[in-house]
Image (spheres, rainbow, N blue to C red):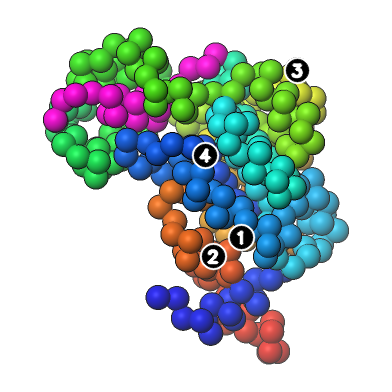
């Protein structure tokens, strides 16, 4: 249980620090098993209603303009969505329009251009569709006998993909399909695959026409940049900007795939700056202050695992507190010393 007084102090201390929230997919109907980056529409609507009532939700442009002036107004939040799921148009946009909240979509260019699934979706759809009670995949026996087991199996299978090079991914997907006794066509035509399908460029332009969405780049293929050559990384970072700009106009923001400290380095930062991005985003779970590096801005991932209480706690000081930034620094700032 969160202690109310501690919660209040953290909320007060962080009032002039912004949060950038990262969403991915929002689904009207539940999946066969829970997956972190696919939220239910009901869950998402609760969060959006709370944000609209209690926070100042601004576009990325407005947040960065305030950052440049050294001033972040109290309780500022900016919403972002990664990859480019069609449900960002069918489920997310109507809610944003109802509450008049702006957002930024970081587009994975190849995901939108080809309508191919990203590798986590191949895993999810295969594990959801197979009739087998267990699957032997990548040296692991995956238990699929109930919903909870399939959720654990999904996490175990994705772990096996994270440390392979992008060139190995197609073969690993084929290995998974053999293990689950499914064909590519069966997976691609499944109901789950349709629920998590990608936007096409006409649909991206519909989001643009709404006036609520800005756009950023999330590379072309969503590969781990640190597993690529310099020229491959350049193509992913700079090529994504050029591709998206052909469709919707200027793109000023770039978000690293995965975004953890081991998922990018100084070379990738330099490439993104060279490409002309105004700001670069990581997956570091911290708040944005006037002192934050505009080329390494943090974002807080919002997943299906967060309860309403945990969501509110994170927004109201919990994130900065977990980053170890308050005690004693914030107390000195508040009370002198």
Q: Are marks 1 and 4 in contact (CB under 8 Å)?
A: no
**Rounded to the nearest whole Å, what is the CA distance between mark 1 and mark 4?**
17 Å
Mark 2: give few (<14), some (14-19) or many (20+) Cα within 10 Å.
some
Q: Are marks 3 and 1 in contact (CB under 8 Å)?
A: no
**Rounded to the nearest whole Å, what is the CA distance between mark 4 and mark 3?**
27 Å
Q: Sequence order check: which comes first, mark 1 or mark 4?
A: 4
- Where does the magenta region start and end? 114-133
Q: Which residue is mark 4?
A: 26
**Rounded to the nearest whole Å, what is the CA distance between mark 2 and mark 4?**
19 Å
Q: Sequence order check: which comes first, mark 2 or mark 4?
A: 4
> Toward the viewer: 19 or 86?
86
Residue 238: percent from left, percent from top: 67, 24
Q: Which mark is residue 50?
A: 1
Q: Which residue is mark 3?
A: 246
- Front disc: 3 or 1: 1
Q: Secondary structure at mark 1?
A: helix
**Rounded to the nearest whole Å, what is the CA distance between mark 3 and mark 1?**
36 Å
Q: Sequence order check: which comes first, mark 2 or mark 1?
A: 1
Q: What residue is rendered at 40% in x and 52% in y? A: 305
**Rounded to the nearest whole Å, what is the CA distance between mark 3 and mark 2?**
39 Å
Q: Is residue 158 above or below residue 42?
A: above
Q: Sequence order check: which comes first, mark 4 or mark 3?
A: 4
Q: Secondary structure at mark 2?
A: helix
In the displayed structure image, the side of residue 140 where residue 42 appears, left or right = right
Q: Which residue is mark 2?
A: 312
Q: Secondary structure at mark 3?
A: helix
**Rounded to the nearest whole Å, what is the CA distance between mark 2 and mark 1?**
8 Å
Residue 226: percent from left, percent from top: 48, 33
């Amino acid at each position: 249980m969160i202690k109310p007084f501690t919660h209040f102090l953290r909320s007060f201390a962080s009032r002039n620090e912004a949060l950038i929230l990262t969403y991915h997919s929002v689904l009207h109907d539940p999946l066969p098993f829970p997956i972190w980056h696919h939220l239910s529409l009901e869950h998402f609507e609760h969060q959006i209603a709370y944000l609209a009532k209690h926070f100042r939700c601004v576009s990325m442009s407005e947040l960065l303009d305030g950052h440049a002036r050294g001033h972040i107004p109290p309780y500022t939040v900016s919403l972002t969505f990664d990859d480019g799921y069609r449900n960002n148009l069918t489920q997310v946009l109507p809610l944003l329009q109802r509450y008049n909240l702006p957002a930024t979509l970081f587009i994975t260019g190849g995901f939108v251009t080809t309508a191919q699934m990203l590798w986590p979706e191949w895993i999810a759809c295969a594990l959801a569709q197979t009739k087998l009670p267990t699957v032997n995949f990548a040296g692991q026996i995956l238990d699929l006998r109930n919903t909870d087991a399939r959720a654990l199996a999904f996490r175990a299978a994705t772990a096996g993909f994270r440390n392979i090079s992008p060139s190995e991914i197609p073969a690993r997907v084929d290995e998974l399909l053999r293990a689950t006794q499914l064909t590519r066509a069966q997976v691609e035509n499944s109901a789950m695959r349709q629920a998590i399908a990608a936007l096409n460029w006409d649909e991206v332009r519909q989001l643009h026409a709404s006036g609520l969405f800005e756009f950023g780049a999330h590379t072309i293929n969503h590969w781990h940049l640190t597993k690529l050559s310099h020229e491959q990384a350049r193509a992913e970072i700079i090529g994504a900007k050029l591709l998206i700009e052909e469709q919707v106009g200027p793109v000023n923001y770039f978000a690293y795939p995965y975004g953890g400290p081991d998922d990018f380095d100084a070379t990738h930062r330099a490439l993104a700056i060279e490409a002309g991005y105004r700001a670069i985003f990581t997956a570091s779970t911290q708040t944005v202050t006037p002192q934050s590096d505009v080329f390494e801005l943090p974002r807080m991932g919002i997943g299906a695992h967060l309860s309403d209480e945990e969501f509110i706690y994170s927004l109201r000081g919990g994130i900065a507190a977990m980053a170890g930034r308050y005690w004693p620094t914030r107390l000195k700032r508040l009370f002198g010393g």
